[in-house]
Image (tube, rainbow, N blue to C red):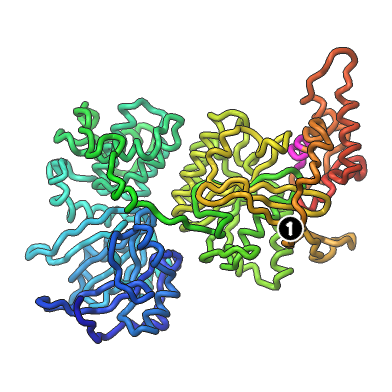
Amino acid sequence: MGAAVNHITPHLAGMHVPAPLRALQSWLIWRYESIEGEKKPRKIPYYVSGSRRFGVNGSAQDRAQLTTFEAALQAAIRRGYSGVGVALLDGGNVTALDFDDCVTASGIAPEVEAAIAGTYAEYSPSGTGIRAFITGELGNRKSHGTREQPIGFETFSSRGFVTVTGNALDITELTACENVIAPPSTALMQYRGTRFARALSHDGYAAESEPIIGLSEDQINQCLTVLDPECGHDDWLHIGMALHHETLGDGFALWDAWSALSGKYPGREALEARWTSFGQSGGRPITARALVRQAASHGVDLGLDVARADDFEIIPEPATPAGGHFKIRSAADFMAQVRAVSWLIKGVLPHAQLGVLFGGSGSGKSFLAFDMCAALSRGLDWNGHKAPRPARVLYVVAEGVGGFNLRMQAYCHQYAIPPSELNIDIISDVTPNLIDPASVKALVADIKAAGAYDLIVMDTFAQVTPGANENAGEDIGRALGHCKHIGKAAGGALVLLVHHSGKDASKGARGWSGLRAAADVELEVTRFDNNRCVEVTKLKDGRDGAQFGFKLLDVVLGADEDGDDITSCIVEYGDFAPPKAAAPDKKIGDVGSLVLNVLRDLYGLGADGVPQVELIEAASAQLVQGGGRDKRAYRVTKAIERLVSAQFLRIQDGCVIFADADCE
């Protein structure tokens, strides 16, 4: 190990870092160290514990020692280190751009300034280089400076680290990009293609004879949006090859996300095996000209004259990659890539792909979901369980918008906080349709524009899958595939579905049984008398069975024009008895469960209830008529009476409403 060097350090105490970078749990500290035989000192990374960063970048051991920006900054100040840096990790959806020797007395090299325009960029510690950050993963590549091209250029996506100074460029401040981490621009992609073309020609592509176009990620997505992922196998394969060539082998996420919208999606591993085989055949590659030409036939005009007649010539079957299509690897290689379980709420809510929170009507599941989100967004532990770091939340309010607004008001009122303290974004005006690929693509585009999220809540699953057959694996499987695609596009967010119980509560959530199998975590909310309970009924990478009692407490927010109280509820946790002693669904029977489901489906936004006659007619229509006289209406009427007696429902002005309508 070299000796530490006392060096002029960046001004750490007040340094500015863009919010998307601050949100990463991948920060280190570093210091200059002289290495024997080398003229210049090196920037050596350390964990905040003071131990040097060794081992496999991105391994479970490595990730466990990376930390927040604030913790790294304080450690650097306390230990007298030169500065802080960010580690680039697989799945982080961020690429760091490193330009060396591009700043002279004349200013920044024009080609570099054009490449980093529109995103955050800063001076390196030496002042002669520039760091910039973009969304997406452009790979780990390096092009050394030469006599003809003195500027060195390097990209980091999944390994290494880069120092961060907070010394933003003037152009960054003038264009108000201090907190913007933008997708790669066309100018950057063209610069990257030019700088890396020579190196990539050794990977099987005749790079100089088949140059890339320089499409930005946005332009590629414009093309993919109009192309059908259900196309024939050859067309699907050619699109993947075109993306591989255009992105210099680093655009797998784009092909995977588009392919996942198809019912024929073979899975990520199968796609990765195909992807790694592209460019190995030695034949003329399929290029992005093919992609642009197909998109143009569907009305997409990128203003590029790039189509060519032989873009679809048949090429030899790709060679089998190392390890085979099934990627056989040693136990040591496999274990080196295993990551430790990451938590939103330790032991309750993992930082995984898909979660389900379900319960019967009036159980308080939506209140519970919001309470979890509120705690996470504020960086608070939830009900005594540690939340390792603050989370950014996106909440899709697909029903009961007015009630959700009151719910937020009640929470802020109870805890005396301003709404700005809730790091929660809301979608309520337009409900996404998880069955419709076009709607999903539009949602993904909006999410990418808004930045990364840790948790995305869909409340309720039924309302974001309109027209779907809840019992059909084809419909629900497609929606779940879209959910995982959405979470991935948001930077690795957990998508939590708020869902209803089935008619038989003992059989879990309503609809297709594969929903539970697909979920990484499942939470069931039950109600017994005025108490409620949430149980962790499945936890893929942890221990299930944990139960937490809670109540809903009224909060008076004011009075309406008639002088009546405007109220909502907040969640209060306590050691309440588990719900096993009471089985309300069994008491009310199958017809009672049907009535509750029908009432929920008929309950319009802001409605004062459902006319009893209409409810009886709708529920009767879903019952099977037995022999003899039709008694369906009678059976439904008696079920409503039992539900009223059991305080599940109440009748007001001839309309049926939930007994705790304000607390659904």
- Name the residue located 38 percent from the left edge and 40 percent from the top edge: 268
Q: Quadrant of residue 279?
A: top left
Q: Secondary structure at mark 1?
A: strand
- Name the residue located 39 percent from the left edge and 43 percent from the top edge: 222
Q: Is residue 507 visible?
A: yes
**Vertically, is 4 above or below 100?**
below
Residue 281 falls inside the magenta stretch = no
Toward the viewer: 558 or 533?
533
Toward the viewer: 207 or 378?
378
**Outermost residue, left direction?**
147
Q: Quadrant of residue 195?
A: bottom left
Question: For this view, does 9 lie left or right of residue 519?
Answer: left
Amino acid beneath label 1:
Phe
Image position, residue 94 (x, y; %): 36, 58
- Name the residue located 89 percent from the left edge and 63 percent from the top edge: 563
Q: Quadrant of residue 235?
A: top left
- The stretch in magenta equals 597-604
Q: If the image is split into quadrants, where does the N terminus sit?
A: bottom left
- Name the residue located 60 percent from the left edge and 54 percent from the top edge: 395
